[in-house]
Image: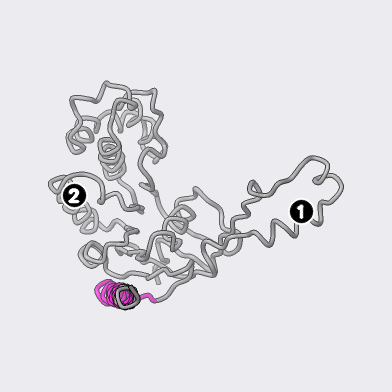
Amino acid sequence: MTEPAVELQHVTKEFYPVQNLNVGVKQLMLRPLHLRRMARNSRFVAVDDVSFAVASGETFGLLGRNGAGKSTLLAMIGGILRPTRGAVAVRGRIAPLLEIGVGFHHDLTGIENAIMNGVLMGLRRHEVEERLEQIFEFAGVIEFAAQPLKTYSSGMQARLGFAIAVHTDPDVLLVDEVLAVGDAAFQEKCFERIAALRAGGVTILFVSHDVRTVSRVCDRAAWIDGGRVREIGPAERVAERYHTELLGEKQSRSAVDFLARTRAAADA
């Protein structure tokens, strides 16, 4: 039996925002146990006991509201964050595309950033240099290739980041909401490239809160809610159930707002 390309076993990620505590050096020295309890009580559980496996060549979506824990999961899979508990295993060369500007140096040129990021993703320098024209043409920024990245708009940076990632021959590609940036023509180009990577057997993890995108791109999906897995299954089914709940909440809020306005008008 083939091992999964990505596997999470009982993964939990906790954050302790101790910077919000009013702590002085004297307190640190004289009351360390009290401060430890304060930090424990202020902890935030971003991901809570999540387990799933993604087969080699599968496109797997992480669907949920903003703040549900999707991006934190992807950051742990990409090795950016370490889990507090549990284990994450990734088999193969990974290309993380997690956030606009991550991994870029704004004082370097577009070319220098492309070379640096391509090497960090596992290519040799000469391999990246051979692909530079393809990368900048795909991103639509070839005329700015020699310009410092600080002159690029956020959309240009996102397009360049996506172009670098998909030209590094990854075994596992991580995509976090990047298709929300750019015009319709570039988004369609991204979808076509993702389809080509899928056909070539690349494993893709795709984070979004857009049910249409998840249904279109993914084979299976996990609905993440409050840091926990709400449901895992075929992408269309999970997206439909997520969408249905969101619609129900919006209708409920609309009804409450309507009743409130009606009562206010009657009392006036």
Neighbour tally class for label 1: few under 14, some 14-19, many 20 plus, Cα within 10 Å: some
Q: Percent position (x, y) of residue 7?
A: 46, 64
Image point 37% across, 38% down: which residue? 101
Query: Among all residues in the image, which is located at the extreme front?
Result: 268
Q: Secondary structure at mark 2?
A: helix
The answer to which quarter of the image holds residue 109 is top left
Closer to the chain start, of discs 2 and 1, is: 1
Task: Read off the residue under disc 1.
Answer: 35
Instruction: Look at the image and tell me whether residue 75 can be seen.
Output: yes
Neighbour tally class for label 2: few under 14, some 14-19, many 20 plus, Cα within 10 Å: some
Image point 58% across, 60% down: which residue? 44
Q: Percent position (x, y) of residue 54?
A: 38, 66
Q: What mark, if any, has residue 262 been given in the picture?
A: none
Image point 23% across, 68% down: which residue? 215
Is residue 238 depicted above or below 194 in this figure?
Answer: below
Number of numbered callouts drawn: 2
